[in-house]
Image: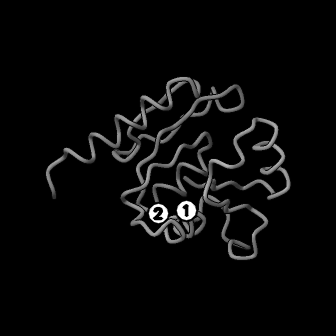
Amino acid sequence: MAIVSSGSRVYINRVLERHGIAGRFKFIVAGDDPEVEGHHKPDPLPYLLAAKRLGVDPSQCIAVEDSPAGITSALRAGMRVVTVRNPANRDHVLLQDELVVAHIDDFHGLSRTVIGCIVDADTAPAA
């Protein structure tokens, strides 16, 4: 797993450390990384860079997003998306796209939702 965020690396690391999950991610693509300068969400580059670093095709990735710009970025990269509603985006109309595979109201349902998406992808017939 990786983090793709428009936030600064310092901020992201602080949040991950505060929640005790910093070691659970292979790497971070941060908004202040030189590789993404000028290519922030909704540009697909941050997500494409993450897929490349993970060594997987973007179509095999599931992005978890809570902002319209992030959803657009992941969709443009060719990823499936799970949208998360939060107090900051509760009134936004989140994108309706065939690659938006699920909407959840908080992170409590995330594990079950992502696992369901992976199972669906593994059992779906090849196009």
Disc on res. 24: none
Which residue is pictured at 68% across the width and 54% down the height? Answer: 5
Q: Is residue 61 above or below residue 39?
A: above
Assess whether mark 1 and mark 2 are in contact (beta carbons under 8 angstroms).
yes
Cα distance in 3D space between marks 2 and 1: 6 Å
Extreme residue toward the front, this view: 23
Residue 47 marker: 1
Q: Residues within 10 Å of mark 1 (few under 14, many from 20)?
A: many
Q: Which residue is mark 2?
A: 77
**x, y (%) of residue 35?**
69, 76
Q: Quadrant of residue 101?
A: top left
Vertical order, 12 against 26 (above or below)? above
Q: How is the image coloured?
A: one colour
Please tell me how many numbered marks the rendered image carries. Answer: 2
Left or right for 89, reference 10: left
Q: Residue at x 56, y 70 (%)?
A: 49
Query: Where is the C terminus found, in terms of image quarters?
Result: bottom left
Residue 59 location, quadrant? bottom left
> Compared to 60, does 84 lie above or below?
above
Upstream in the sequence, badge 2 or badge 1?
1
Say what amino acid the circle numbered 2 marks: Ala
Question: Residue 99: percent from the left, percent from the top?
Answer: 37, 47
